[in-house]
Image (cartoon, rainbow, N blue to C red):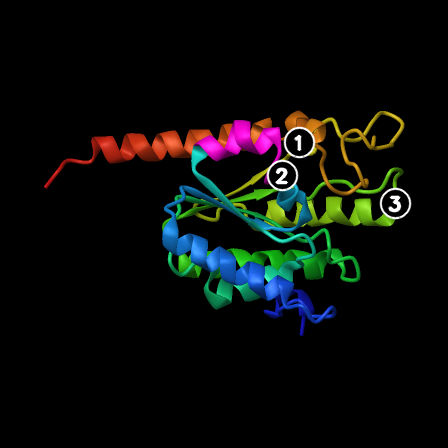
Amino acid sequence: MNPCAVPTPVPDVDGDKRWLSIHRRFISDCREKDPDVIFLGDCIFETLQDTDTWNQYFAPLHCLNFSIREDRTENVLWRIENGTLDNVNPKIVVLHVGTNNTSNSAAEVAEGLLANVAKIREKLPGAYIILPSLLPRGQQPNALRDKNKEINELIKERTKGMDRVQTVAIDKGLVHTDGSISHHDMFDYKSLTNTGAKKILEPLHDLLSQILNENELERDLTPSE
């Protein structure tokens, strides 16, 4: 059985139940707020929460960020199965997870991602599901960077034709011509700085805005009963 596709909570190694507390807070936020967009994922989007990029591009779109730094595909899948999307009805779910599945093959991670897509569709039949590409990582070219690229190719191929599921490339400009990544763009060569985020997230913002605007137009054109 593929561990990437088996719902699994993050082990409470430190004994403080921090991860579970964050999960429960997200569920509480769903009851209190009415987001148009929910971000689900890992460190890539968690670190954006309090940045100028988030406040400028995503907060105005009525987004909630339910990303947890260490999450792998199986951890997000567990959260979805255990209430994260049960009391909310967003128009869009942005899913970015898989870069932390370092011990798994590209095929296993892709299957785990698709299991998340299927579970989101089960919970939210009418929502759009947006899959930003996994980002390159490491200052210099390396095997994990190659694996993330392979995962992106697998996901792009296997989601073709899926209703209301769309991939979007967000890695443009991160890798320099010599193959290196700057700490000005990714402070730990994995997570984005505010500068790096502004450089690459415009395509995602534009896609979300387009979908939300089309959704609003459809609502305006629907005859009242």
Identify the residue at image location x=88%, y=45%.
Answer: 142
Give the image quarter of residue 215: top left
Quadrant of the snapshot with the C terminus? top left
Point out the residue furthest to the bottom here: 1
Q: Report how far apart the C-alphas of labels 2 and 1 lie in the structure.
A: 8 Å
Indicate the position of residue 28 as horizontal and vertical percent values: 44, 58
- Name which of mark 2 and mark 3 comes first in the sequence: 2
Left or right: residue 117 versus residue 210 is right
User: Is most of the magenta stretch helix, strand or loop?
Assistant: helix
Residue in the foreground of this view, choosing between 181 and 156? 181
Rendered view: 205 above or below 165? above
Reply above or below: 206 against 49.
above
Furthest residue to the left?
A: 225
The boundaries of the magenta stretch are 48-60
Judging from the image, what secondary structure is the residue with disc 2 in?
loop
- Residue 53 within the magenta-colored segment of the rendering: yes
Provide residue 171's location: percent of width, then percent of height: 70, 33
Q: Amino acid at mark 1?
A: Ala
Q: Position of residue 214 (x, y in %)?
A: 36, 31
Give yes or no for contact between labels 2 and 1 (Cβ–Cβ under 8 Å): yes
Residue 142 shows which numbered tag? Answer: 3
The disc at residue 48 is 2
Mark in the foreground, 2 or 1: 2
Task: Identify the residue at image location x=60%, y=37%.
Answer: 50
Q: Which residue is mark 1?
A: 197
